[in-house]
Image (cartoon, rainbow, N blue to C red):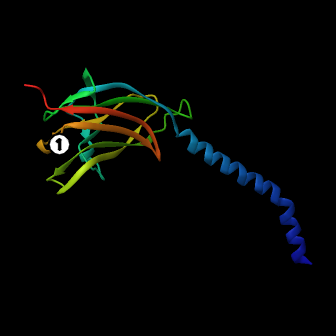
Amino acid sequence: MHFRNSIRRRGKNWLPTRWLVSFSLTAMVSCQRADLIDSIGVVEAGIFVLEPTSRSQEDQPGSTGGIVTIAPAQLVQSTRIIPCIKGVAFGCRYRFTTLGHGSTKTVAIRQVIRHPEFYDPIMKRRSSEAGGVLHQRPGSAFFAGYTLDFDFELVPGFWIMEIWQGDRVLDATVFELRYPSM
């Protein structure tokens, strides 16, 4: 008999507990959705000059290439045709908003650069892709790109810069690297 009473009490109190669990799950989903990027735009694309204080992806753990992730950068030329010259930095300045409009919480996004295959003697492997994770705040413009630091990177062809969040491609910008005409 005592066992039955405890079941009944649990049964009466189950609805408020169910409501609380439902509310908690809704709040968790809302928080996660607030971080979802709902729009992203390329503010500038082309050749940039990077300030000496810039940090490249190589400086960060888990790096896979010469991607510049945090760089005070100034646009020199708005173009999608990039000269295949050592030291040239190219890429895009982006700006995005999230579903949680007005949010200033940093959002993790991933940059992937697909390029013609080359052999990297430093890493001792062939490469046709580089990438890294960027942590940016919604609304602020940021630069993400690639610097041609080594001779082995001077490979003409189409280089595609993608910005991802989770399994969604948010933007893909195509650059064509060409040897300069003499």
Can you tell which quarter of the image residue 135 is in?
Answer: top left
Relative depth, front residue between 153 and 22: 153
| Residue drawn at (52%, 40%) of the image | 35
Say if 35 sits above or below 122 in the image: above
| Residue drawn at (77%, 56%) of the image | 18
Q: Position of residue 153 (x, y in %)?
A: 17, 42
Residue at the spot of label 1: 153
Say if 80 sits above or below 31 in the image: above
* Residue 135 located left or right of residue 148: right
Can you tell which quarter of the image residue 149 is in?
Answer: top left
Q: Position of residue 99 (x, y in %)?
A: 56, 34
Q: Residue furthest left?
A: 182
Q: Residue furthest right?
A: 1
Relative depth, front residue between 118 and 70: 118
Q: Position of residue 141 (x, y in %)?
A: 38, 28
Query: Residue flagged by tag 1: what amino acid is it?
Result: Glu
| Residue drawn at (37%, 39%) of the image | 162
* Residue 116 located left or right of residue 18: left
